Image: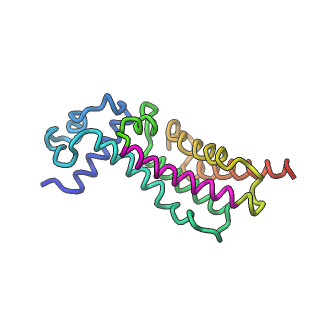
């Protein structure tokens, strides 16, 4: 009898196939073959391939947001500590969902109908609000330079998300080392700007 574990395994297999072959090229039969079942079994959990894509993207966004949600209304914490936590949690989640370059997040997002796309975008907007809030608070406390918080947030997020395209654990850098590098690169960059403007 197929249960929740079966559905999750199907999602994990679909995720890998979507990023390996591309969403359009990966068929429900491919997913079934990789799982070791008949395509009809997939319909016990998903009505169509779009449903699988939506759950794949939703799951990833939920895992990105969950560790940083506590920062959304935190007015007391140290912005530098918060930014380090933000980068570390997002990077670790991103690399646990490593993808190939054939299907980036926005490409998959374009395959969803407006209602579902809006739900994913709302979560991404929440992510953006959190990082911008951290940067803005750092600027207000003179920890960071007066910077365009929107651009700074995009740049930091881009470093994290693009790492999935090239990172490989067997090529000389560990995840903790990469976390430290991106943390130091981001924070030192903000502080360097501050020193030039002082």
126 is within the stretch colored magenta: yes
Residue visible at 56% across and 55% down in the picture: 88
How many tags in the picture?
0
Q: Residue furthest front?
A: 114
Q: Position of residue 145 (x, y in %)?
A: 77, 53
- Asked where in the image residue 20 lies, by quadrant, the reply is top left
51 sits to left or right of 180: left
- Asked where in the image residue 39 lies, by quadrant, the reply is top left
Q: How is the image coloured?
A: rainbow
Q: Position of residue 126 (x, y in %)?
A: 51, 54
Residue visible at 75% across and 63% down in the picture: 141
Residue visible at 31% across and 28% down in the picture: 25
Residue visible at 57% across and 66% down in the picture: 73
Between 90 and 50, the residue placed more toward the observer is: 50
- Secondary structure mainly formed by the magenta segment: helix
146 sits to left or right of 16: right
Position of 14 relative to 75 (above/below)? above
Between 168 and 130, the residue placed more toward the observer is: 130
181 sits to left or right of 13: right
The magenta-colored residue range is: 115-137
Q: Residue furthest bottom?
A: 76
In which quadrant will I find the N terminus?
A: bottom left
Q: Position of residue 110 (x, y in %)?
A: 41, 35
Q: Residue furthest top?
A: 25
132 is within the stretch colored magenta: yes
């Amino acid at each position: 009898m197929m249960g929740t574990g079966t559905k999750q395994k199907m999602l994990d297999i679909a995720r890998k196939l979507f990023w390996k072959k591309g969403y359009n090229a990966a068929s429900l039969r491919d997913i079934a073959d990789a799982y070791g079942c008949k395509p009809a079994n997939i319909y016990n959990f998903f009505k169509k391939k779009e449903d699988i894509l939506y759950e794949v993207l939703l799951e990833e966004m939920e895992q990105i947001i969950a560790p940083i949600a506590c920062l959304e209304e935190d007015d007391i914490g140290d912005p530098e500590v918060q930014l380090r936590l933000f980068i570390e949690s997002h990077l670790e989640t991103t690399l646990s969902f490593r993808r190939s370059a054939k299907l980036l997040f926005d490409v998959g997002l374009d395959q969803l109908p407006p209602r579902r796309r809006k739900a994913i975008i709302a979560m991404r907007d929440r992510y953006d609000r959190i990082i911008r809030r951290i940067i803005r608070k750092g600027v207000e406390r003179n920890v960071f330079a007066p910077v365009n918080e929107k651009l700074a947030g995009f740049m930091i997020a881009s470093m994290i998300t693009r790492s999935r395209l090239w990172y490989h654990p067997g090529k000389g850098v560990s995840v903790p080392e990469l976390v430290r590098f991106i943390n130091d690169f981001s924070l030192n960059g903000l502080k360097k700007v501050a020193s030039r403007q002082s």
